Amino acid sequence: MALAAMSGHAMAAQVTVLTAARIHTMETAQPKVQAVAFDESGRILALGATAELIKRYPKAQRIDAGQATVIPGLIDAHAHVSGLGMTMLSADLVDAASKQEVVQRLQAFEKQLPPGAWLIGRGWDQNDWPEKTFPTAADLDAAFPDRPVWLERIDGHAGWANTAAMRAVKRDLSGDWQPDGGRIERDARRQPTGVFVDAASALVEQARPPLDDATAERALTLGMQSAVEHGLTGVHDAGVSLAELKRYQRLADRGAMPLRITAMADGNNEALESLCQHGLYTHPSGRLQMRTLKLYADGALGSRGAAMLKDYSDDHGNLGIMVTSPEQIAVAVDKAKRCGVQVATHAIGDRGNHVVLESYARALGNDAAKTDHRWRIEHAQVLSPTDLPRLAQMHVIASMQPTHATSDMPWAEDRVGPQRIIGAYAWRQLRDSGARLALGSDFPVESVDPRFGLYSATTRADAQGLPAGGWFPQEKLTAFEALRGFTLDAAYAGFAETQVGSLAVGKRADFVVLTEDPLAIAPNGLRNLTVQATYVDGKAVYRAK
Amino acid sequence: MALAAMSGHAMAAQVTVLTAARIHTMETAQPKVQAVAFDESGRILALGATAELIKRYPKAQRIDAGQATVIPGLIDAHAHVSGLGMTMLSADLVDAASKQEVVQRLQAFEKQLPPGAWLIGRGWDQNDWPEKTFPTAADLDAAFPDRPVWLERIDGHAGWANTAAMRAVKRDLSGDWQPDGGRIERDARRQPTGVFVDAASALVEQARPPLDDATAERALTLGMQSAVEHGLTGVHDAGVSLAELKRYQRLADRGAMPLRITAMADGNNEALESLCQHGLYTHPSGRLQMRTLKLYADGALGSRGAAMLKDYSDDHGNLGIMVTSPEQIAVAVDKAKRCGVQVATHAIGDRGNHVVLESYARALGNDAAKTDHRWRIEHAQVLSPTDLPRLAQMHVIASMQPTHATSDMPWAEDRVGPQRIIGAYAWRQLRDSGARLALGSDFPVESVDPRFGLYSATTRADAQGLPAGGWFPQEKLTAFEALRGFTLDAAYAGFAETQVGSLAVGKRADFVVLTEDPLAIAPNGLRNLTVQATYVDGKAVYRAK
């Protein structure tokens, strides 16, 4: 070894050759190989047959994955890392089958809290309860008369407070007034019931004691750790404040980022201003970048906050809510355009999407299809028939979350009716129109686990395989397309396809080792893929026990 | 009833309402209904919920398909009806596992032939035999010393004669000469071995006694009957002479066409001339049309007759064969363009496809993507990376046969090597590039059964499900896409999408009743769909016993 180190190869970094039963590269010209070689920095040197690479790198360190399948590292194109971490630091109310169960879970969680601290929970969904109506503060007050309780709805678009939490709000919540872009649910006596939709949530949020920096950093760390344990090597964090970016930067400086974060600036605020003043941001480690503005056009479908062109089918007179006015969107989009910043706008309802497309069309002008803008619509969930083809025409990326379709399918058609549902969760129609799909989970709204996304994308079915054959099965993707949405096309949406998203010479050795071959097993097996290990820059950031 | 007939509805034709568990319309705006109403002429009047249609047409005749699934009638975009019928009138050699088995099958078939009649067989494939080499006349001469024997290869691109058949050829077959666009296999003594590749087959074909008209018509009838028994309501017949068109016309005049035939004129010959002189042809019954020129650019991959840009990987020095020279193609294409005739050219090898694309580009000029030309490439089997995107760019339809991929997969990569195979049978890449796929079978080269095509398209696997997960699984289609290729996109390729290909008001009631739901079952079940009935113009043309 010492002699070798002195030889002509002296300056060559240590090479690793990883072999597996099959390595799906996601590269058209060489889709399947058995071996990949990468250097100490994690840059891929070669791909090919095992014998060929061993001959070429005789001194290489060997990793033999045996009968496993290797795929490029999975990238979640839309998620909330801090939110996931905070979920892990708050009471989990997902799938609670009744308000009683919510209270029981909160009581169990309360035991670890210091006296007086706010009890935060997340994940309730009235659609899971027998009565299917919004809860009230009174449902919480008996168990929690004094401790403020604040519970976020599953979709993040509504909050549920007890009376103690509402008492902490300085402004008088009674009366007829409503905040812009939100709704305070009120009873016949014009008193708040305890549910705050969309922007109204801010009234309670602002009354919470500020999050200390250590807890915030702990949330990021927990979120990222959970991500790599599920095979993710990259996440597009959809809404990061300047303070949060600085937290990420500190973690990156310490080498404490196990995966790549593409942070999006949270609206027309400080982070965007920073991009405009100092330019697009990339950390030297390659693990952190910010070059995108995240806007919210409207709310969500579950809480009927998505902005619709016509009334909700199950709520006459309700058109949903523009969280950001078309004028404010235009101002922010113009600023991003001036600064060379990519725009990614949350749009769920057909009006939300229409406003965003109009705004993009105006800002990008005739350049829309010519420049490499890569502007995105996040969710692109309900599209009118005339707007659907415009994404492809304008080269706007559809950043979609397959699990939203399978989570929403029990009630989505109730909300929008039999016509509008055709343009909802319309992956295949968008693909056929020529649009690019970047796939994600929107965790913690949905599970961080990308296996669920691959499964939903290919089956359009729930965990039990229902409805048989899938919901609107004409919109299914093949396993390969689903995988591409979570790798190469997600990378593209983050301007990172020259570095990650596929396994090719010169790219980063970001990959996942799976027991099963996701392109060979039946789609209903994708939920149960076994992640053996996750590698970023050629180093294992997660190994199954 | 008599009163009703006198009422305001007096002139209304008898309406039929068909109901089923589900009717997949293939129409985006209304993908699934439970009932369809059509008039006596077979024109669809309405689609919707059962109660709604029964209320609207209270006197309608009812057909209740119970738990069945209804889909639009399947259309085979590339097949040979007379060839299928002739197969049924000749010895079946498909899947014969050895030359000995071929001879045994021929001996069994011979019993029904009059003395002296030629023994015609079809479907041999030397790749199925232990030796995997071309056979010779001597293999047949012992069993058939006097009766001429002429056996077409599985792909129709080579024939195998015994000595008696070669004796019937007037021209001296020995020596060094070769016919244009074909090859006489010869031994060291320059004597023909008995195999005639591509255009060389014509030497033996021309020596056969002419087919009598009654037999030819019988072949068409048998072929069409077999088609409707498999759920086909339309076939694009890829090469029809003027004499054959007249045979079809006689059948159509007699009401003896159970399905719709889109006949393509067989090369730059009489049928094309007739189109140029008399205009595009449509029979008043709507069951027969001719508006297309079918050309052959090259041969087939199995017999190494497909024209390649570089040598066959398993036959150094062999570039395959242009069956029609680029100059002849240009002349024919120009004539079609002048006459407003659609062009559909057989192209298998990457050179064959390149020549066709060049020829189309030159003939269509800058209009390629603007006019509604719908020119097609038949097979589009091996495409170079630079040519693949040109189909979408020029709006050229890829008319492909899923079963070719799964039939050819055991040896296709041997023929073209690991690079060129990436652009072969590349359905998904073509779809992603924006090209339209019209699907077919090329029967009798492959089975007439479209279930096999749906299965191959979605699994890329053979009947045993091998290779596990499919061959180049990244090219798989979803069940919906496969179905669209056999319905709406095949209809489009035949300029018939306003009449058939989906179930919509004003279109023809061409549909298939299936026991299973092809969009709900797992793809490996598509081979075993149960065709209960086939309807054309609202009338059952086939019902399972």
Image (cartoon, coloured by chain):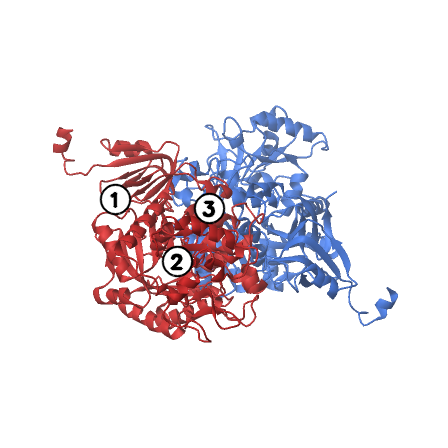
Chain colours: A blue, B red
Is the residue at mark 2 from the same chain as the one at mark 3? yes
Q: Is residue B475 visible?
A: no
Q: Which residue is nearer to you in this view: A453 or A234?
A: A453
Q: Which mark is residue B43?
A: 1
Q: Are marks 2 and 3 in contact (CB under 8 Å)?
A: no
Q: Quadrant of residue B372?
A: bottom left
Label total for image: 3
Q: Closer to the N terminus: mark 2 or mark 3? A: 2
Image quadrant in which the C terminus of chain B is located: top left
The numbered mark 1 sits on a residue in which chain? B
Element at label 3:
helix
Rounded to the nearest angstrom, the CA distance separating label 2 from label 1 is 52 Å
Q: Secondary structure at mark 2?
A: loop
Cα gap from disc 1 to disc 3, whole angstroms: 27 Å
Q: Secondary structure at mark 1?
A: loop
Residue B362 in view here: yes
| Horizontal and vertical percent position of residue A318 | 41, 39
Which quarter of the image is occupied by the N terminus of chain B?
Answer: top left
- Residue to which mark 2 is pinned: B147
Q: Are marks 1 and 3 on the same chain?
A: yes
In this view, the residue in front, A526 or B320, is B320
Residue under label 3, please give it. Answer: B479
Kind of residue at badge 2: Arg
Residue B119 rendering spot, x and y as whole percentages: 38, 55
Nearer to me, B515 or A294: B515
Horizontal relation, residue A330 to residue B284: left or right: right
